[in-house]
Image (cartoon, coloured by chain):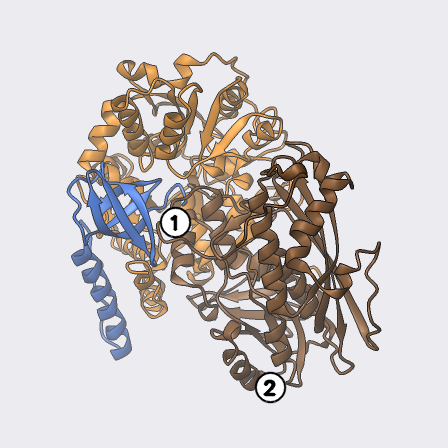
């Protein structure tokens, strides 16, 4: 990665973000041209107009927005920039859209080291490339020291939806199968362990990844009812929300849900339940029972779906609730968590 | 995971359940002393699997739940002292005292940090020598030896800024108090597996000798709990009264003598206030005089607030096994995890929180 | 980690009174000050950063064997075993 040597007036090297970088003046322009555009360049962004003018799509559009305030901003498996792109791409993908365009609004804390910002922007560019999307519009604001936690990123994402794709919780039917694309709890545990300074000597890594490729592979099959990515609140929360929207009941086999040993170990130690821990590179899909096996086969052929598994069924009993069949064969109803799980000793 | 997964084997669980069902004739009420047992019993669905003649009542074995509001207020006041860093186990952070919680004190600017171990607190003290670091010591005999060790470590390192506010408590006096109060008729007790790992089985002899009540010391995996229940059912069935050890891979008669020595070197027994149970004599632990330099309660002045309970809160009755959480009039309606009234709902291991999280919900439709 | 709970972990290496332990492939440094008799290769129960007891693997196996016998006896319709006590 080349160091930014051209930022600053009179060849004075600027190491940190200053308030002036957000003022719209010379330093702002130098930041945009010297840093953001070095990595994010594309014909739409490079026009540097007030808005990006985009080609017609001839299809339904999907539009989403998200803000990223994660701490720490660099973590095993990614950083806030990668997360911002993946999170937005994934939101679009979950409704069956092909993601195309992202915006990126940065709120920077005065004093943020420029090399950190550069790493983040480079990471966004690399992730955007991998996902096949472009950042076509951006904004930068700088606030005084202490008024933001290093960097916040807001995104909007737009994609187009093919005519034959109509995903919705209302499509779900009794007898449908519930599948997940891989192990649960990776991202949240990686962040929690790092943030709390829990010195695990083999760091757990976030699973942060763009899912649009996997989703398009899944959508080559008929019978895909709905998809959701289990981010905040984890698998349990996403399932409960889906059950409520579908007005049907779900029954999940606890023993089938894949959880990596390291995540299980960290959860045992901290008294946390991996079913409620965030994921950033996984999806839940509800599919018709006749298609389930072949959908799984397709998912397992994709690098992000190697551990795809069937975890449960849609049923008529206990509508709008998710029943978890425990290891002992007893079914209990899963509830939403009211607050963030704290690392517990008790 | 080794030595965890094997004790969750569903087939072996069925074998134990068959045995329990065969023997459990008359109505039986067992008290699961530990919050951890209540949690496990609900999480794995064990309650549903036990025969209906067998009732499980929860007990006061939740150190967070039994921390008195006065003591908690003192901790919050300490957190508010300028420059103090208050370190605590996560569970205590949300419990409401008279005027907010540690978490709300943090939101108002107090430096409250959640730690996993008292060693982390010692580390903080080492890194910030100009600031007093107070560790909020909550927990029974499972936790107290480690906290005692942290004081010895701080002493060895010549730290003058590490303090412990000890709210540690002893479990046998609480059990004695429950039985002496005779508010609940108990057929047997599911004993605390990790407390007993430390203190050994001797301290439970009074249950057979004085109160003629069976106890089986249990671990926390499903097979451990079911095995202990099976042993208790056997004792009851055979009209025998003993201290059974259903956790022999961890519990020995003499306990962990090193841990006990360290705990007793640093701490001495004192009277303690148990939320929902009042003052129980000789049931608490406080640093001995020679460790006064590490005792937060001797170093930091705080005004005592009177013991209080939020109006209508019935945590006391839940902690003493009189109510099941579902029988508390506030449960779910007024008191829930978003708006907890008392500590049994706030603490992740409180009986009410466990029942709310894992228990059957009324159908909304 | 819950107040009542201690988790069994494997000791990978020992350095003074500290040990590097492993659970599910995740390692952590904890204190053996309360269990000085523990050795590399032992399983210990850890709580709040300290090992509070050494797990007796023989006892663990015996308990599981006993339960397995109970299961087999059930299946064969035989008498169930008496439970053990101290």
Asked if residue A299 can be seen in this view, the reply is yes
Determine whether, in the image, residue A176 is placed left or right of residue C48. Answer: right
Asked if residue B215 can be seen in this view, the reply is no
Determine whether, in the image, residue B340 is placed left or right of residue A163. Answer: left
Q: Which mark is residue A269?
A: 1
Q: Which chain is brown?
A: A
Q: In the current view of this chain or complex, which residue is farthest to the front?
A: A10
Chain hosting mark 2 = A
Q: Colour of chain B?
A: orange
Residue B180 position in % (x across, y down): 37, 31
Give the CA distance from mark 2 to mark 1.
39 Å
Depth check: give the residue in front, B285 or B89.
Answer: B89
User: Which residue: 76% across, 73% down?
Assistant: A160
Which type of secondary structure does the marked residue at label 1 adopt? helix
Q: Using the image, determine if residue B232 lies above or below residue B206.
A: below
Residue behind mark 2: A291
């Amino acid at each position: 990665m080349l160091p930014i040597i051209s930022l600053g007036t009179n060849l004075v090297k600027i190491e940190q973000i200053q308030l002036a970088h957000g003022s719209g003046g010379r330093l702002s322009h130098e930041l945009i041209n010297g840093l953001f555009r070095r990595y994010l360049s594309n014909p739409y962004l490079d026009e540097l107009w007030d808005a990006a003018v985009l080609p017609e799509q001839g299809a339904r559009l999907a539009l989403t927005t998200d803000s990223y305030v994660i701490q720490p901003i660099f973590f095993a498996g990614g950083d806030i920039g990668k997360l911002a792109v993946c999170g937005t791409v994934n939101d679009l993908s979950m409704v069956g859209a092909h993601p195309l365009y992202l915006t990126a609004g940065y709120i920077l804390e005065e004093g943020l080291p420029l090399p950190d910002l550069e790493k983040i922007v480079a990471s966004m560019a690399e992730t955007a490339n991998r996902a096949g999307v472009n950042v076509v519009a951006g904004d930068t604001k700088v606030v005084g020291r202490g008024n933001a936690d290093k960097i916040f990123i807001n995104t909007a994402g737009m994609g187009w939806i093919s005519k034959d794709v109509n995903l919705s919780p209302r499509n779900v039917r009794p007898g449908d199968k519930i599948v997940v694309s891989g192990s649960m709890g990776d991202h949240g545990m990686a962040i929690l362990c790092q943030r709390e300074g829990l010195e695990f000597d083999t760091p757990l890594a976030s699973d942060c990844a763009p899912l649009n490729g996997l989703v398009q592979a899944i959508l080559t099959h008929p019978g895909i009812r709905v998809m959701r990515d289990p981010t905040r609140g984890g698998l349990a929360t996403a399932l409960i929300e889906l059950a409520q929207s579908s007005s049907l009941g779900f029954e999940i086999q606890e023993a089938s849900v894949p959880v990596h040993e390291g995540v299980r170990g960290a959860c045992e130690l901290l008294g946390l339940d991996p079913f409620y821990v965030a994921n950033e590179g996984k999806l839940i899909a509800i599919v018709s029972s006749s298609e389930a096996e072949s959908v799984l086969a397709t998912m397992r052929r994709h690098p992000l779906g190697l551990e795809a598994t069937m975890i449960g069924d849609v049923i008529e009993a206990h509508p709008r609730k998710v029943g978890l069949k425990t290891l002992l064969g007893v079914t209990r109803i899963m509830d939403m968590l009211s607050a963030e799980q704290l690392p517990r000793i008790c | 995971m080794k030595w965890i997964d094997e004790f969750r084997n569903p087939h072996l669980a069925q074998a134990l359940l068959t045995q329990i069902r065969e023997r459990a004739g008359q109505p039986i009420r067992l008290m699961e002393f530990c919050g951890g047992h209540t949690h496990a019993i609900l999480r794995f669905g064990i309650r549903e699997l036990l025969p209906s003649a067998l009732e499980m009542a929860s007990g006061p074995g939740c150190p967070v739940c039994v921390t008195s509001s006065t003591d908690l207020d003192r901790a919050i006041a300490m957190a508010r002292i300028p420059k103090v860093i208050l370190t605590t186990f996560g569970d205590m952070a949300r419990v409401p005292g008279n005027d907010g919680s540690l978490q709300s004190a943090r939101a108002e600017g107090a430096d409250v940090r959640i730690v996993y171990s008292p060693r982390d607190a010692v580390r903080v003290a080492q890194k910030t020598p100009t600031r007093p670091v107070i560790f909020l010591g909550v927990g029974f005999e499972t936790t107290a030896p480690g906290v005692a060790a942290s004081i010895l470590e701080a002493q060895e390192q010549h730290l003058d800024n590490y303090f412990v506010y000890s709210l540690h408590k002893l479990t046998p006096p609480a059990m004695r108090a429950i039985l002496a109060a005779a508010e609940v008729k108990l057929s047997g007790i599911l004993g605390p597996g990790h407390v007993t790992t430390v203190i050994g089985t001797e301290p439970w002899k009074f249950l057979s000798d004085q109160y003629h009540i069976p106890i089986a010391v249990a671990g926390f995996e499903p097979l451990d709990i079911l095995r202990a229940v099976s042993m208790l059912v056997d004792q009851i069935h055979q009209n025998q009264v003993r201290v059974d050890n259903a956790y022999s891979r961890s519990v020995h008669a003499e306990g962990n003598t090193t841990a006990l020595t360290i705990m007793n070197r640093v701490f001495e027994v004192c009277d303690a206030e148990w939320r929902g149970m009042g003052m129980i004599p000789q049931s608490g632990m406080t640093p001995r005089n020679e460790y006064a330099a590490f005792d937060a309660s001797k170093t930091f002045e705080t005004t005592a607030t009177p013991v209080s309970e939020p109006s209508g809160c019935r945590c006391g009755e839940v902690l003493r096994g009189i109510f099941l959480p579902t029988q508390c009039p506030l449960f779910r309606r007024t008191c829930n995890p978003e708006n907890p009234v008392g500590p049994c709902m706030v603490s992740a291991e409180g009986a009410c929180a466990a029942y709310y999280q894992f228990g059957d919900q009324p159908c909304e439709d | 980690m819950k107040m009542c709970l201690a988790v069994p972990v494997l000791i990978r290496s020992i350095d003074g009174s500290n040990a590097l332990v492993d659970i599910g492939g995740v390692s952590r440094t904890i204190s053996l000050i309360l269990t000085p008799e523990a050795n590399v290769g032992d399983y210990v129960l850890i709580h709040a950063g300290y090992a509070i007891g050494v797990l007796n693997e023989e006892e663990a196996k015996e308990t599981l064997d006993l339960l397995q016998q109970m299961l087999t006896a059930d299946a064969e319709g035989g008498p169930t075993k008496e439970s053990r006590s101290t």
